Amino acid sequence: MGRTIYKSLPDMSLARKRVDAPLLIKEDIKVSERVRSFAQGKTYLIKTFGCQANVRDEEIMAGYLEIAGFVKSGDENAADIVIINTCAVRENAEEKVYGMIGSFKALSKNNPDFILGICGCMMQEVGVAEQIMKRYPFVNLIFGTHNVSKILDLVDEHLARHKDLVDVKSFSGDIVENLPSSRLDHCKAYVNITYGCDKFCTYCIVPYTRGRERSRSVEEIVNECRQLVEDGYQEITLLGQNVNSYGKDLKNGTSFAEILRKVAELGIPRLRFMTSHPWDFTDEMLDVIASYPNIMKCIHLPVQSGSSEVLRLMGRRYSREDYLDLVKRIKTKIPGCAITTDIIVGFPNETTEQFEETLTLCKEVVYDAAFTFIYSPRRGTPAASIADNVSSEEKHERFIRLTKVIEEGVIYHATQMVGKTYDVLVDGPSKKNSDLLSGYTESGKLVHFKGPAYLKGCIVSVKINESHTFSMIGELVDDPLIAFAKQAKKELLNEPALKAFIDAKEKLLADKELNELKKQIVSLQKQMTVALRDGEDSSYEEFKAAYLEAKEKYDTHPLVLNYLAYQEDAASLLEQAKEILS
Ligand code: 5AD
Ligand code: SF4
């Protein structure tokens, strides 16, 4: 393609000054004729790095591309449009992105229609877009986290003007609703509840790349979740950089506890949420988590460091003692609750003693799992300008020591599970051994076990026989067919046609007038029988006329007609289900 047009470039310095309220945009999905005809017979591929927010963006971009007519590519080396969705949280994620961009050079050379787009958090960093355009002239589109919903407009402009485009917005961010989505999993779903972050931890780039903290409305979240329940999803994870800050910006008294309660009450079998910030984790939230059996007793609670001084320098707003106190409250209110965390080692000038405080904290909490990272300076964040006196070797040694302590905790929890039975949501065949199925327990432990493939998407009971550090081996306790039948029943009951039928029947049973008519019909039938037996012909005729009138009234009542119409739909659905099962 020709020259690059720089429509807009990011300015990270605007992040702290943000004051404007987010706009609520109800996206109207339009596909230009140009994009539609270009997409004919073409395939797309999206490569995502980083966290669940990026995974959700991938699903939304896939939604747009599919609406335009692109089909998901089954072959990594033959897609017509490739989008690389990047992460900026640590340097090593960025290095992988550069490697990947390079790997699409040949595809770009061999296919004149090929489009390579790069998006995501890394593009929100100052200077990155220009550097990519210089180093990789075959890149066609660069956009950021704030204009994911403009992907088709960018493709259209690229096709119309025959130019490569860079369009990275740098503002606080809006809330866009009515987004299309092609979900990657048909059993577990992510639902955004907040976007962005206002915490500005001194090491973290997220508040600069994803904008201010902004909450979606309760109604939008609940509607999205209700649809997922109706579609038969088994697990929803509510997503936000700090889920417990949910609603603060709405200033209408809404809170994360309320969202949790409302979504749990929709009846999703498993409800998770991430990430929680230890600073504003309320007792109300703990009470809600404790009281709903379908809210998984598993809390991801990043500690980052066990030293109060390091936490202060990180801008985390809690001390070691505050964190340990919260852990105690969790363990008291929700016995057996799994706790997982994120930890950074080697924050600038972290002393050996401060690092050892992280080790003692981990020994005290005994985490179920932890993601551990070596501090990575991010340009534009306050911590990046601190002169650091800890060598890279020292940081690596600390990292290895920390990993060992974490592993001890993980192994402790794993060993406790042996001999016990747990509910496991089956993901499908195990990635390492296709003879086995794999899935996760409530606490997020990976379990492998033998079972038939049709159990994918079912929640089954599995007895744990063996524990390894990061996974368990178990055996199916349920009869697989019964587990499958239970699941099929649940899914059938969620089918709109069956739901409408059940609803119509309930309305019919509750209607006073119809109940009265029914009683009359039964009593008139009895009177007809008695009159017939006693040879009272004229009474018989009278009762019969009254009976026919009542019956006509009943049979033509709108609630009865509705019931019969829905009954037809439900019967045809059940016929289909029977065919599938047989
Ligand atoms: N260096 C290392 N780890 C980081 N994280 C965020 N920023 C950095 C950084 N600059 C880690 C934190 C966070 C997780 C998502 O990534 O632990 O919780
Ligand atoms: Fe980054 Fe801190 Fe916000 Fe988490 S809370 S996204 S670590 S700034």
Image (tube, rainbow, N blue to C red):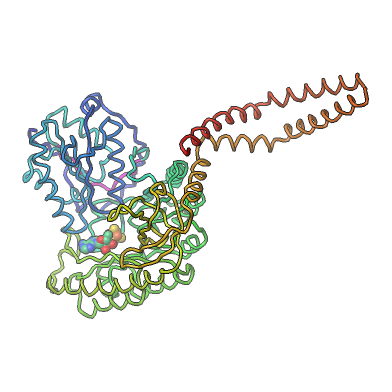
Q: On screen, 526 above or below 287?
A: above
For the question of whether residue 450 can be seen, the reply is yes
Residue 232 position within the rendered picture, expressed as x and y whole percent measured from the top left = 45, 44
- Answer with the quarter of the image where residue 309 lies: bottom left
| Magenta run includes residue 173 | yes
At 47% across and 69% down in the image, what residue appears?
Answer: 335
**Residue 26: % across, % down:** 37, 37
What span is in magenta? 165-176
Most extreme residue toward the bottom, as rendered?
353
Residue 247 lies, in percent from the top left, at 42, 53
| Quadrant showing the N terminus | top left
Query: On the image, which quarter does residue 240 sit in?
Result: bottom left
In this orientation, which residue lies closer to the viewer: 449 or 365?
A: 449
The residue lying at 57 percent from left, 30 percent from top is 566
**Relative depth, front residue between 503 and 265:** 503
Q: Which residue is rendered at x = 36% and y = 52% of the image?
A: 239
Left or right: 422 with respect to 499? left
- Residue 203 visible from this viewpoint: no
- Number of numbered discs visible in the structure rendering: 0
